Amino acid sequence: MSGLCDGRVVIVTGAGRGIGRAHAHAFAAEGALVVVNDIDGAGAAVAAEIGAAGGTAVADESDVADWAGAAQLIGTALAAFGRLDVLVNNAGFVRDGMLVNLSEQDWDAVIRVHLKGHVAPLRHAAAHWRAEHKAGRAVAARVINTSSGAGLLGSVGQAGYATAKAGIAALTLVAAAELARYGVTVNAIAPAARTRMTEGVFAAAMAAPESGFDAMAPENVAPLVVWLGSDRSRGVTGRMFEVEGGRVSIADGWRRGPVVDKGSRWRPDELDPVVARLLSSAEQPHPVYGS
């Protein structure tokens, strides 16, 4: 390996399996010191795997969607390694179902784990980096958030998940703008890979091939995340990357489109031709997943 992240201290949340596990291994292979976070204890096995391969990792079982738990997670990195350079927010799960059948409990759980589970670690990591900056110590920190195509385009049967992932996209923009002054970049990925969240819902698309390149292997996502966590990504912030198999692309968010300005207040009965004109000159939106 190239040692792209030699000595950098990295937290990966939800790293007990799937994409998060692949991130943890990839960072360690590039010389990073890794905090493997997973609330159900699966991080211990991953940390042991990294150690057996010659890397350095510690396990953490903090609840990242709890304010105190997220603070504890940041404390684990500082206690174990004395610094923090990279936060990869990855933890999540799904509670799928059509909107008309959505329960309050499932909605709250998905929003909590995905959205609050990003906000809470980010808030505590940002406070640490701001303190380091104010103390005159150089900061070259990276945050990589995990959104989804469902958050960018919507996904039938995944109202809570899509809403949370869309919120993470907006959070990334805000954090990138607020934290740049402290030496912190914030980007997000929208990955497509085989995980517990996708292999049941999209079983055919996610199935591993009998031979050849496995485009849905979670390990395909990690190289971009490692690069974003390295010093080489300085200057790249506030961006959304889609990654699937060997394909990497930039996703552009909402942009202001066509405008009609009357210069005074519209009457409702005047707006038929106005809206028709706007729609005729605007780009057609991408279809919602599953529609």
Image (spheres, rainbow, N blue to C red):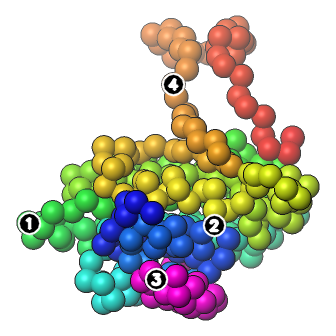
Mark on residue 136? 1
* Image quadrant in which the C terminus is located: top right
Residue 253 in view, yes or no = no
If you read the primary sequence from the N terminus, does the residue marked by circle 4 or circle 3 appear first? 3
As for residue 48 lying within the magenta part, the answer is yes
**Amino acid identity at mark 2:** Ile
Q: CA distance from mark 3 to mark 1?
A: 34 Å
Q: CA distance from mark 4 to mark 1?
A: 40 Å
| Residue range (magenta) | 40-66
User: Secondary structure beneath disc 2?
Assistant: helix
Instruction: Please report the residue visible at 78 percent of the width from the left and 40 percent of the height from the top.
Output: 288
**Residue highlighted by disc 4:** 256
Mark 3 residue crowding within 10 angstroms, few (<14) / some (14–19) / many (20+): few
Residue 76 in view, yes or no = yes
**Residue highlighted by disc 3:** 54
Instruction: Please report the residue visible at 52 percent of the width from the left and 44 percent of the height from the top.
Output: 240
User: Secondary structure beneath disc 3?
Assistant: loop
Instruction: Please report the residue visible at 74 percent of the width from the left and 66 percent of the height from the top.
Output: 195
Q: CA distance from mark 4 to mark 2?
A: 34 Å
- Foreground mark, 4 or 3? 3
- Foreground mark, 4 or 2? 2
Q: CA distance from mark 3 to mark 2?
A: 21 Å
Instruction: Please report the residue visible at 72 percent of the width from the left and 46 percent of the height from the top.
Output: 154
